[in-house]
């Protein structure tokens, strides 16, 4: 079953074609990685799917329903959540409070003038933090966390929205190399257990080859290649143009 379907998406900023005819079907339950050079339009795609940008042409369907023109909050209600390249945490609040605030937002009850911690929210936040192995830092203020814990907390907040689809923009950027794999292992375990479909932008090819079911290669607002990591990441054109590795086959193809 196709959960998300994009067809003919176009969006230009002045003369820059950030999306130049994007067609992509995301299957229910899959982990799809998006790779590609800086400026290829990867974040623009995530912004269009999550309602932060409106395409100038094309259609997006989620679970069969058209979603272009719907506001981000509406899309969250439909089950689409995201995490950001720079985590959007409430820095002066603890990790548990951040997750509880996401739960309150999901319930439509969040209010800046009533920062009341309801016991049901707290219990649910504790449960989510346990899934992410973050119980030990539940009482830490968000501004004291290292980048890996910040990223996981941001994703825990997205999971608190109970999504069917999550879009993650560079979940490992800024995370120490030694921590990357364990962080992705954790988030993949949580998302797979919850049956969440995931689209994630990733620059680390080790992460992509270990955790993605399929890889889409972005290049100048288009999808240049799409398929399982074993095929895409050994394609000489992808190696040369996207990953920047010259191979004999790559030279021959040039
Ligand atoms: N709001 C905007 N206004 C003007 N130009 C934009 C805007 N958003 C993106 N662009 C441009 O569109 C192109 C695609 O940007 P986008 O951020 O989607 O690329 P990306 O593949 O996510 O890159 P990166 O890996 O650096 O995050 C870039 O040339 C960028 O400068």
Image (tube, helix red, strand yellow):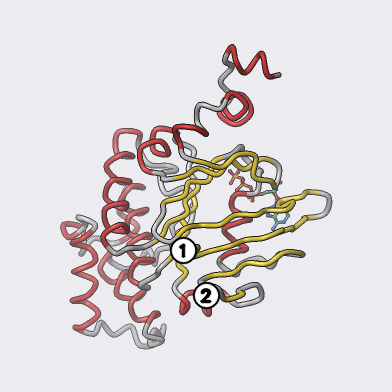
Task: From the image, tell me which residue sits under label 2.
Answer: 75
**Image-based side of 18 in relation to 104, left or right:** right
Residue that label 1 marks: 1
Residue 103 in the image: above or below residue 11:
below
Q: Say few, some or many: other residues with alpha carbon within 10 Å of mark 1 (under 14 / 14 to 19 / 20 or more).
A: few
Q: Secondary structure at mark 1?
A: loop
* Relative to 119, residue 53 above or below: above
Which residue appears at 19% of the width and 69% of the height?
Answer: 126
Task: Find numbered disc 2 in the image and state the secondary structure of the residue it sits on.
Answer: helix
Q: Nearer the viewer, residue 149 or 103?
A: 103
- Residue with the most extreme top position: 248
Residue located 60% across and 39% down the image: 225
- Foreground disc of the pair 2, 1: 1
Image location (x, y in percent) of residue 122: 21, 77
Which residue is at 41% across, 45% downward? 213
Measured Cα–Cα span from mark 2 to mark 1 = 20 Å
Sequence-wise first label, 2 or 1: 1
Q: Residue at x 23, y 85 (%)?
A: 118
Q: Rate crowding at label 2 as few (under 14), some (14 to 19) or many (20 or more) other CA atoms within 10 Å.
A: some
From the viewer's perspective, is 210 left or right of 135? right
Residue 238: x %, y % from top left: 59, 30
Report the label total.
Answer: 2
Res 39 quadrant in image: top right
Quarter of image, res 240: top right
Q: Are marks 2 and 1 in contact (CB under 8 Å)?
A: no
Q: Is residue 188 above or below residue 254?
A: below
Q: Position of residue 148 (x, y in %)?
A: 33, 47
| Location of residue 8 (image quadrant) | bottom right
Pick whichever, 230 or 192, lies toward us.
230
């Amino acid at each position: 079953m196709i959960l998300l379907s994009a067809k003919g998406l176009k969006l230009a900023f002045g003369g820059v074609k950030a999306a130049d005819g994007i067609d992509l079907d995301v299957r229910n339950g899959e982990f799809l990685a998006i790779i590609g050079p800086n400026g290829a339009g990867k974040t623009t795609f995530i912004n269009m799917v999550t309602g932060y940008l409106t395409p100038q042409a094309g259609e997006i369907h989620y679970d069969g329903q058209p979603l272009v023109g719907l506001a981000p909050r509406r899309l969250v209600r439909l089950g689409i959540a995201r995490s950001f390249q720079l985590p959007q945490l409430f820095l002066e609040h603890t990790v548990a409070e951040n997750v509880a605030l996401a739960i309150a937002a999901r319930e439509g009850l969040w209010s800046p003038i009533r920062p009341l911690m309801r016991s049901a929210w707290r219990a649910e936040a504790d449960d989510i933090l346990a899934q992410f192995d973050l119980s030990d830092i539940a009482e830490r203020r968000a501004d004291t966390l290292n980048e890996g814990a910040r990223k996981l907390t941001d994703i825990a907040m997205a999971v608190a929205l109970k999504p069917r689809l999550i879009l993650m923009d560079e979940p490992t950027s800024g995370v120490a190399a030694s921590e990357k794999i364990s962080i992705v292992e954790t988030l993949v375990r949580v998302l797979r257990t919850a049956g969440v479909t995931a689209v994630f932008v990733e620059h680390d090819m080790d992460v992509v080859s270990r955790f993605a079911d399929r890889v889409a290669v972005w290049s100048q607002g288009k999808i240049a290649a799409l398929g399982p990591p074993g095929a895409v990441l050994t394609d000489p054109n992808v190696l040369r143009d996207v990953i920047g590795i010259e191979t004999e086959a790559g030279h021959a193809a040039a």
